Image: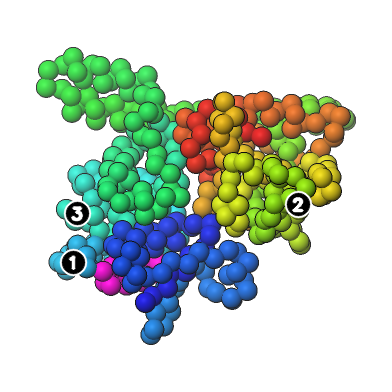
Amino acid sequence: MMELLLDASASPACSAAQLVAVYAGLVSKNVVTVLKLSHNAQKLLNLPKLPCLVNGSGLLTQPGAILKCLAGSSQYTKILENVTPLGKAEIDQWLSFLAQRDYAVTDAAAIKTLNGHLQTRTFMAANNVTLADLGTYPAVHQWMVGASAEERLAHCNVTRWFDHIQHLPGISKAVGHLTTVDIHTDPVPAAAAAGSANGNAAAGGADKSKGAMVNGVADQAKAKAKKAAKEDKKKERAEKKAENSNNKAPERPVEDVTRLDVRVGQITKVWQHPEADKLYCEEIDIGEEKPRQIASGLVPYVPIEQMQDAMVVVLCNLKAKNLKGFPSHGMVLCASSADKSNTELIRPPPEAKIGDRIAWEGLEGEPDEVLNDKKNPFSKVQPDFRTSTDKIALYKDHRFMTPSGPCFCDSIVGGTIS
């Protein structure tokens, strides 16, 4: 039996390995055992970067080699790896493409390359799903979660392929931590809707209209980005000029969300408060010298096994409070449904690192050392915290952003965040 070692934070490379192992039937047939390790466990065992595949003859640490070994150990080898020399070479080419990006395809150039490749294809490298598809799906997932409707439409070939893969039988069950992205509820941009209407009205012109629509939206998005960049530079110059002309900078408004110090953390230890039925006591690694102690009223909503080793989003500069004798130094941010019947953890993207600072798109500012209790910025901005239709965490219309992408919840749409 082989052992597949994965990190508990579910990086794209680990998700790809898990997907192949489960989808190929290796886990259900007890050929492979999947073990998920916390950050602390990896350090303790002195393991290389995960995933790792352990078998009787040695240790594999390269994701591409792991995917090939798993496929070769299944009854679907000829399908997943392709039997033709050209097919195998094409799969190797895409696995190399993924390896160069650490299995996280989020940059515009890489997405554009995929979009061009998939223009005339249903799958990445053959007439059926292969390792190229199973490796690329987790790699593209975070981009798809955070992309706007315009971006998805501008890269419609990637969007079509992704939606097809995520709905193949067995895919969602194999990687349940990768949420299904609801492509079909995206609002259609006005320009695209107009192009579609004109295409339907013109006999025989549907395909031409669709192409024009996609190109038009792409051009519109580029123009909008260029205009925004110019406006940002203009605003920056104006702000510097105002700063130089005043000896004393104006006082920051209380309702400034950038005064919050919000970071990525991982729960390394969790237990139920002995004197409070609804409270968990947690130790959370946020990249400091020692873990933070934080109490959270999540017992009715999140099972303790889902709390342990979970990657979370933490408000770090609240004034410390004593909750039933337990000193709490922060807050784990969660999404709640409108009727308060459901509460879920706000999660960072899988590739986010412990200690990463959360920012809000388009907003700049340094966090306070400790938030003022009497004039608390959090109480002023929290009413504008919400989740979008794509389950992305927002302040007004600004996404909660790590250096690796936006934060999100598992299923709550239009909920509040606190």
Question: Visible in this render: residue 361?
Answer: no
Tag 2: amino acid: Pro
- Kind of element beneath mark 1: helix
> Which residue corresponds to mark 1?
78
> Which residue corresponds to mark 2?
274
- Kind of element beneath mark 2: loop
Residue 194 at what x, y percent from top left? 30, 17
Question: Visible in this render: residue 333?
Answer: yes
Quadrant position of residue 372: top right
Which stretch appears magenta?
62-74
> Which residue corresponds to mark 3?
128
Up-down relation of residue 66 to residue 371 (above or below)? below
Whether residues under marks 1 and 3 lie with C-beta atoms below 8 angstroms apart, the answer is no
Up-down relation of residue 95 to residue 242 (above or below)? below
Tag 1: amino acid: Lys
Point 33% across, 72% down: residue: 31
Alpha-carbon distance for marks 1 and 3? Answer: 11 Å
Alpha-carbon distance for marks 3 and 2? Answer: 54 Å
